[in-house]
Image: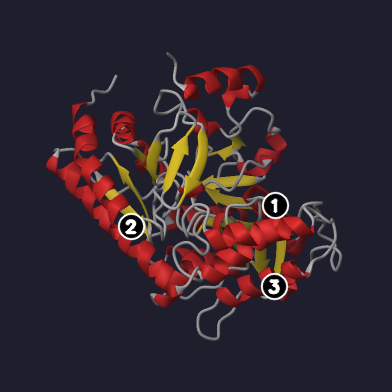
Amino acid sequence: MTDRNDDLFSAARTVIPGGVNSPVRAYGSVGGTPRFLASAKGATVTDAAGNEYVDLVASWGPALLGHAHPEVVTAVQEAATRGLSFGAPTEGEVELAQLIADRVRFGEIRPVERVRLVSTGTEATMTAIRLARGATGRDLLVKFAGHYHGHSDGLLAAAGSGVATLALPGSAGVPAPIAAQTLVIDYNDPDALAAVFAEHGDRIAAVIVEAAAANMGVVPPLPGFNRLLAETAHAHGALLILDEVLTGFRVHPAGFWGLQAAAGEDYLPDIFTFGKVVGGGMPLAALGGRAEVMDLLAPLGPVYQAGTLSGNPLSVAAGLATLRLATPEVYATVDAAASRVSSALEGALADAGVAHAVAHAGNLFSASFRASAPRTYAEAQAQESFRYAPFFHAMREQGVALPPSVFEAWFLTAAHGEEELQRIEAALPIAAEAAAAARGV
């Protein structure tokens, strides 16, 4: 008898490229059949075959409160009774934009004065880059190897042969002239940053950076690095785009920028991008920044952006409910759960004799199978990643769902209680032994 997940995957591959609608879901790096999820509640998800798992994916971040939080679900249901989409302004859009602007603050510092709502993180970063180019009249963009900012053409670029070499396309279908507008340098490397600005400074529109890298595993910025980015960009007339699609409103009420500001690291990005938590699990993202930059967007300015579903009322309702419920107590609960699980993860791998490093960015964390925490994409790739697949499957067999890639962050929620945490802790030593027994090809 086949598993229902196997049947669904076979059917999916006949009508959907690769059987999935986002590549990492195909389990390409861990092998096996993807779990087709049928439902989720609190800290657990249930697949099409009826198997329940303690979830450490949290829809890749949005489920800060836990899955299907009753008040969020009720807000969406009530919004749906009033209409699914209007293609016109709504009161909820104004409330959500005000709430985003009010949360991104430290003392009297409020770097987000205007907010534009869009539908996806890719759309937010794409618009932010267009806005930066419109604001500066320049074309070049600096990004960091291993950082992911969505799948728009200019951001799918691989590093060239040197720190200031124009990039080549990192995906088929990306024209070389478009990729050549992106300069890819090593993360956490002040010398590379100085070199790229020394050579191209008067043509660089912006630097875009994940507030803390979380798409090559969690790799936090070195102390002072984000501040250096802002100072360097501004000294050359360029802007800093801080990508908080993953970290925004998840690691702190004001995002990773707020976490750093509270720790004494003062810098001011020009444009922020938000996603995931800001939509509460619905398709919604945003960009925000100071008024003089944001007001260059149409209809006030010459930088065009539009979308029929921008500010969709159901997504706005979910985002408003989630952010209003994301209290200091919620963050304290998530932080404590993340600390407990990451400590148990370190202990299990150490006891099994597996070389490892667990890196943190607030309550986001991940393990790399190497002796020291990576600081760059090259270092993140230089690990015994073959150990992750058996680790992943052993956790799944024990009823715990992990991200299906070693290069992803782990996410806890406010719904992870004592029972769920104990189930994770019980599974980790078994998975660590599976990782220890793994052999590379």
Cα distance between the residues tagged 3 and 2: 32 Å
Quarter of the rendering containing residue 299: bottom right
Q: Which amino acid does label 1 sit on?
A: Ser
* Mark 2 element type: loop
Given contact means CB atoms under 8 Å apart, are the residues at marks 1 and 3 in contact? Answer: no
Of labels 3 and 2, the one closer to you: 2
In x, y percent, where is residue 162?
50, 41
Cα distance between the residues tagged 1 and 3: 17 Å
User: Of residues 417 and 100, which is closer to you in this image?
Assistant: 417
The residue to which callout 3 is attached is 95
Q: Of callouts 1 and 2, which one flags the residue occurring earlier in the amino acid sequence? A: 1
The residue to which callout 2 is attached is 417
In x, y percent, where is residue 105?
54, 77
Q: Which residue is drawn at 49% across and 45% down?
A: 40
- Checking the image for residue 119, the label placed there is 1
| Residue 202 appears in the picture as rendered | no
Lateral position of residue 294 relative to residue 271, left or right: right
Of labels 1 and 2, the one closer to you: 2
In this rendering, the answer to whether 397 lies above or below 237 is above
